[in-house]
Image: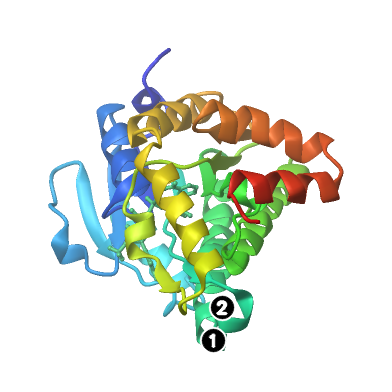
Amino acid sequence: MPKLGERYSRALITGASSGLGKAFSEGLIKEGLSVWGTSREPEQMQSSDQFTPIKLDLTKEREFKEWFDHWDSESGGFDVVINNAGASCFGRWETMSAADVEEQIRVLLTGPMQLGRVAYRALIGRGQGSLVNISSVAGEMPIPYMTAYNASKAGLSAFSQSLMLESPKRPPWIIDFRPGDYQTSFNKRMKKRLENDSECESVWNELEKLMANAPETSAAVSDLISALGKFRHCTRYSGSFVQTSIASMASRLLPNALKRYTLRSYYKIS
Ligand SMILES: NC(=O)c1ccc[n+]([C@@H]2O[C@H](COP(=O)([O-])OP(=O)(O)OC[C@H]3O[C@@H](n4cnc5c(N)ncnc54)[C@H](OP(=O)(O)O)[C@@H]3O)[C@@H](O)[C@H]2O)c1
């Protein structure tokens, strides 16, 4: 397959300081692109000829237009924009504060949609490029006690699918990227509201086991590069066979009650 760098030159990646975002940055640089990668603390990232760290806090930005236009013009114009940044909170719905919920929806859904709005407009004006939304299989197969996360990821995938519907045969190419578990710092950074709740603690321990046994991020990078290289709209599952192929098929075929039963068994909820 020809390198992506033959068609694309510059990528913007949110949440490039760790985990999947960092791996995507390194992968795209190897493909010959220059990357502008965001963090709330960009000074913690190493800059290079191919990598420019830039500041973005999705809980603070509202309009995104000024921020995006500035970096789009500084970079010379992005060909690829990846909504990757994410953070979440674990615990029973009734223990979540209004701020917990608001923050997750901003980081995982409304922020990416607003950034997606201005980026899409720029890409459509250029008649080329790709907009990637890093969603999750959790949007279809919800993770217990991560309600705002599951709902936001379902919304983010619906956002991608809606854009694909608006312009079926022309760029910007939309990629609805749905990973299963990958080994990153996501769980470590998660705010936990366990409240001495044994069921929550037991599900949390299951999530920790899944993360410890999850594939390394290099597999997600290959899947993303292959999806970008198709130069068409694409819904891409990425991760272990059980969490992607089987789970996505089960989510489409099983009645909802059976799906919930299967999920409760999978996460060992009595
Ligand atoms: N790992 C998995 O198993 C998995 C599975 C499915 C989907 N995903 C999705 O993949 C994406 C990346 O997650 P990851 O696993 O790589 O997690 P991670 O290692 O914790 O990385 C999260 C990234 O998001 C950034 N971020 C967090 N809060 C932010 C905010 N308020 N504003 C701007 N940036 C913020 C962080 O940057 P700073 O802290 O430097 O600002 C960091 O670079 C997320 O959207 C996640 O939902 C992950």
95 or 15: nearer the eye?
Answer: 95
Helix, strand or loop at disc 1? Answer: loop
Q: Is residue 221 visible?
A: yes
Point 70% across, 49% down: residue: 163
- Label 2 Cα crowd, 10 Å radius (few <14 / some 14-19 / many 20+): some
179 or 90: nearer the eye?
Answer: 90
Q: How is the image coloured?
A: rainbow
| Quadrant of image for the C terminus | bottom right
Point 58% across, 56% down: residue: 121
Percent position (x, y) of residue 118?
54, 62
Q: Is residue 169 visible?
A: no
Q: Which residue corresponds to mark 2?
A: 101
The Cα atoms of the two marked residues, 1 and 2, are separated by: 7 Å
Nearest to viewer (mark 1 / mark 2):
1
Q: Which residue corresponds to mark 1?
A: 97
Q: Amino acid at mark 2?
A: Val
**Which quadrant of the figure shows ligand 1?**
bottom left
Q: Which mark is residue 210?
A: none
Image quarter of residue 3? top left
